Image (cartoon, rainbow, N blue to C red):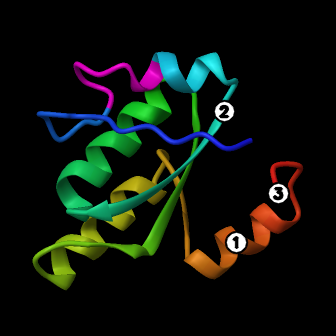
Amino acid sequence: MDYDAVLDKNRYNAFHGTSLDESLRSIKIQELIITGVLTNCCCETTARDAFVRDYRVFFAGDATATVNEELHLASLKNLAFGFAHIMGTEQICNYLKGSEYI
């Protein structure tokens, strides 16, 4: 399914004050892949909220970045503790190739 949307957000959390959750649920999305910048702000905050909203979260550790390696790794460790599956882009692509979505 092709689906493109532009979402204006004004907080670290992509769900806060946006229609993201409603849009995803309307097309029956249950799994999310998080990429982007900053790992320890927008990406981590969005991943945590996605988990709380019962999405299965895949966090691309090599497709996120922040101002230094220490903050990046700390966020990955926090998320891996119970909020997201930390994977590389190659692992995620292999997962997708084996799924019904591709």
- Does residue 20 lie above or below 13 as drawn? above
Residue at x 60% of width, y 19% of height: 25
> Quadrant of the rendered structure where residue 27 is?
top right
The part of the chain drawn in magenta is 15-21
Please name the residue that numbered disc 3 is placed on. Answer: 102
Q: Around disc 2, counting alpha carbons within 10 Å, would you say few (fewer than 14), some (14 to 19), or many (20 or more)?
A: few
Return the x and y of residue 38 as percentages of the image width and height. 20, 62
Q: CA distance from mark 2 to mark 3?
A: 15 Å
Q: Nearer the viewer, residue 55 or 10?
A: 10
Residue at x 12% of width, y 33% of height: 10
Q: Around disc 1, counting alpha carbons within 10 Å, would you say few (fewer than 14), some (14 to 19), or many (20 or more)?
A: few
Q: Which mark is residue 93?
A: 1
SS state under label 3: loop
Say which label, 2 or 3, has the lower sequence index: 2
- Left or right, 10 with reference to 3: left
**Secondary structure mainly formed by the magenta segment:** loop
Q: Amino acid at mark 3?
A: Ile
Q: Amino acid at mark 2?
A: Gln
Q: Amino acid at mark 1?
A: Cys
Is 20 magenta? The answer is: yes
Please name the residue that numbered disc 2 is placed on. Answer: 30
Is 40 magenta? The answer is: no
Return the x and y of residue 46 as percentages of the image width and height. 33, 41
Q: Around disc 3, counting alpha carbons within 10 Å, would you say few (fewer than 14), some (14 to 19), or many (20 or more)?
A: few
Return the x and y of residue 98 as percentages of the image width and height. 88, 64
Q: Nearer the viewer, residue 68 or 100?
A: 100
Query: Which dot, 3 or 1, sits closer to the camera?
Result: 3
- Does residue 2 lie above or below 35 as drawn? above
Say which label, 2 or 1, has the lower sequence index: 2
